Image (cartoon, rainbow, N blue to C red):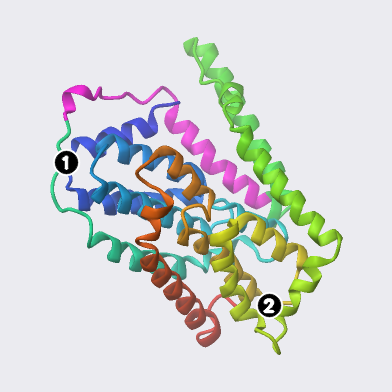
Amino acid sequence: HMGVFEKLKYNLISKGYTYRQLFWITGFLAFFISPIADNLTTALILSTVLITIEQKKKAFLVPGAINIVVAANAGGAWSPFGDITTLMAWTAGKGTFVDFLFLFPASIIGYLVTAFLLAKVVPNTVPETDLSKEKKPEVATGANIVIGLGIFTIFSAVMSHQVLHLPAMWGMMFGLSLLKLFDYSLKRKHGKGFGVFDSMAKIENNTLMFFFGILAAVGALYFIGWLSLAVIVYDPSVLGPTWSNIGVGFLSAIVDNVPVMSAVLKASPTMGLDQWMLVTLTAGVGGSMISFGSAAGVGVMGKLPGIYTFGAHMKYSWMIVIGYAVSCAVWYLQYQVMGIGA
């Protein structure tokens, strides 16, 4: 609404980058915006950039869309604010805010492996864009302050949870109240604000109802005792925690990572910090293996209908599986061998 992302989109289009350069730029933007803005929002914004740059060339759009989904999910895995699964693990007390940051090496290395493989199939030519049709956007008054308030809100949520031992929601609501006060001051000074409540009204209820329904279903399974039976796979005599948590990634790709993570948290198998970090990593990153395995993937399919499809995604899924395996290997080296973050 403030024109920040429109400005970003225009800058990417007007610089004359090749398809391959745009592939890497949008991927890195997704990876580093996702920890702050969340993976779904990031994927939706950057997939809009893709379709603005090119409407027909599937050789760029499909790998580019997959790259954004993988980057957004990988970026969200190491931040409690980047993915619902990580947020759930953090609010459940499975690790401190800093503990999740130690997943950064596994997240970025796994993403880079997948991106390197995907980049091989992206054309290295310059897109034919008619800049005369693109109007240069202007950033609205107060946009920088809104960005600063967003960062402060995240800091406030972390402090309320880690230091004051209050629900993180309180910190988020405090930040939202400051945003509303700033909106009020803009209306007083300039006669026009950005409408906090108008923006909130645009939240998709279908998405919220999906999460409410799926979490209620998981709660029902826990209530009747089925999740307690599933915990048996974590027993060392069966699969053990490491292989079970790696399997969670594949399951999250099929079922969606949110209900899978919810089920693991409800079942609450006895695990150390290192294993809780592994299941957070695998649930977040594993959702990328199938197009509908994460909210980011589903969102991008809606943005690029007929282009980014289940079939198009599966054509390159082996590249994502390799990146997933590398992420797990980096976790093993970091936590089990070197003892960093455990």
**Where does residue 247 sit, x and y in percent of width and height?**
58, 73
Q: Quadrant of the C terminus?
A: bottom right
**Is residue 64 found inside the magenta-colored segment of the image?**
no
Question: Which residue is pictured at 72% across the width and 83% down the height?
Answer: 235
Please, is residue 105 above or below residue 291 in the view? below
Residue 78 appears in the figure: no
Please, is residue 10 above or below residue 141 in the view? below
How many angstroms separate mark 2 from mark 1 (CA)? 50 Å
Camera-near label (2 vs 1) is 1
Question: Which residue is pictured at 51% across the width and 55% down the height?
Answer: 76
Residue type, label 2: Gly
Label 1 neighbour load within 10 Å: few <14, some 14-19, many 20+: some
Who is closer to the viewer here, 31 or 232?
232
Q: For residue 272, which numbered disc appears in the image?
A: 2
Query: What secondary structure prevails in the magenta region?
Result: helix
Question: Which residue is pictured at 21% across the width and 23% down the height?
Answer: 133
**Where does residue 165 sit, x and y in percent of width and height?**
75, 54
Left or right of 37, for residue 304: left
**Where does residue 215 sit, x and y in percent of width and height?**
72, 51
Please, is residue 91 above or below residue 229 in the view? above
Residue type, label 1: Pro
User: Where is mark 1, residue-wise?
Assistant: 127
Label 1 sits on a secondary structure element that is loop
Label 2 sits on a secondary structure element that is loop
Residues at discs 2 and 1 in contact (Cβ within 8 Å): no
Q: Quadrant of the N terminus?
A: top left
Residue extending furthest bottom?
237
**Is residue 143 found inside the magenta-colored segment of the image?**
yes
Chain part drawn in magenta: 130-159
Q: For residue 171, which numbered disc appears in the image?
A: none
